[in-house]
Image (spheres, grey):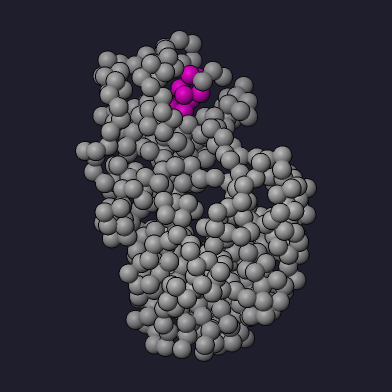
Amino acid sequence: MTPAARIAAAVEVLADIEARRRPAPDALKDWGLARRFAGSKDRAAVASLVYDALRCRASAAFLMGAETPRAVVIGMLARLRNLDAAAIAGLFSGERHAPEPLTQEEAARLSVPPSLADAPAHVAGDFPEWLAPSFAAAFGEAAIDEMQAMVARAPLDIRVNTLTTTREALAGELEHFAPRQTPHSADGLRFTVGEDGRGPSLQSEPSFLDGQFEIQDEGSQLAARLTLARPGERIVDLCAGAGGKTLALAALMQNGGALFATDVDTRRLVPLHGRVARSGASHVEVRSPKGRYDPARPDPLADLAGSIDCVVVDAPCTGTGTWRRNPDAKWRLRPGALAERVKDQAVVLDRAARLVRPGGRIAYITCSLLPEENDGAVTAFMGRHDGFAVAPIADVLAAAGLPSLPHRETPAGGILLTPRVTGTDGFFVTVLRRL
Ligand SMILES: C[S@@+](CC[C@H](N)C(=O)[O-])C[C@H]1O[C@@H](n2cnc3c(N)ncnc32)[C@H](O)[C@@H]1O
């Protein structure tokens, strides 16, 4: 396919996403199935155009004065791909498979440098309007800058499994992909992602297959470290899911102590068994609930009540901190989903309170930037439970060996990592000490 034909395809896929309100991966899959002639490079290029258009959907539409998929793609090419009017006109030639030529209005819009100076915050920051009060509360004057940093593409990060290798040794093994050290996580390596959104295919590397690393954003690696997990402790990973944090915690514990992993949903834990085996972690016990965990039924962790040094709550959340990787999600998020997640967060935190021993701690983590799920969840928890105190940020950072980690402090004393300040996905961490 020519570059112009790929653009026409991206406009088509965006129109399908909009008309049928469907997730981008589904629309892209259907497009690919119906066009067997498209090779893997074409598919990747079309997907990358679609995701880039979704990254900046609101600002691209503002620049073009129209919200159609075509306008959004043209605006994106100017805004994110830095193409000038002549280059865009060259692609929109109207010839075989290329999109129709630019209209006078479109050409006129492209003839001036793109400016969002007059755009409202939710447009300049490319997020849904209903979230404007939340991001204003989180970031004040910096809301637009913070959210514009969320528009950019994320790099590809891995966490080196220190149970089986070292960062230096693995960097040597993966030298052909030119890894760099992550700036803040001592266990991270970073790879460049190309214009087509594709990074190196790390999962077919022998070093991946024998457990020497996991794909994990640097922010997630740092969040695991900020739990202050140490060898010898008894730790519960209460929302383990497929186990990204579990494996990071296991490595921090260097196989010393006990790590219990569970989740409300047994099915989500399925990949964890194989991942634990591959990682060489020998002190992880996966406790699967029968069917779905139900607070009305016996808790598979009941025997651990009041005995745990650290309960890690990697809470179910809206995932607003991961929009760089999943730009489709930001336009699909609805107020009802936020309200549901806040309810889930109260349930998991209350469960954690039953497990932690006096003198122990709960590490509450989200991959969200929304105050409702961060400070809001912590403050509500403190209102329901006596005998907990928020650990001072400076103490947590020092104990985690991250005294100069760039971060934001939230009003209730939480640590917020953001793409703009930390250069990672957005993460929130608060350590609550049980007195
Ligand atoms: C952010 S995800 C976890 C990601 C995982 N820790 C990782 O690093 O790969 C949140 C998880 O919380 C689980 N969850 C939701 N409500 C829960 C509850 N009441 N108790 C335990 N887990 C719950 C969800 O099933 C989901 O797997």
Please state which of residues 140 and 296 is positioned toward the viewer in this rendering: 140
Residue 336, picture quadrant? bottom left
Q: Residue at x 59, y 37 (%)?
A: 198
Q: Is residue 12 a member of the stretch shown in magenta?
A: yes
In which quadrant of the rendered view does residue 64 lie?
top left
Percent of width and height locating residue 119 = 24, 39
Percent position of residue 320, x then y: 42, 54
Q: Is residue 51 covered in magenta?
A: no
Q: Is residue 307 visible?
A: yes
Q: Is residue 407 above or below residue 181?
A: below
- As rendered, which of 127 and 12 lies closer to the eye? 127
Residue 195 at x, y = what percent? 53, 32
Q: Residue at x 48, y 64 (%)?
A: 404
Instruction: Write down the region rendered in magenta.
Output: 4-13
Quadrant in the picture for the N terminus: top right
Q: Residue at x 44, y 49 (%)?
A: 323
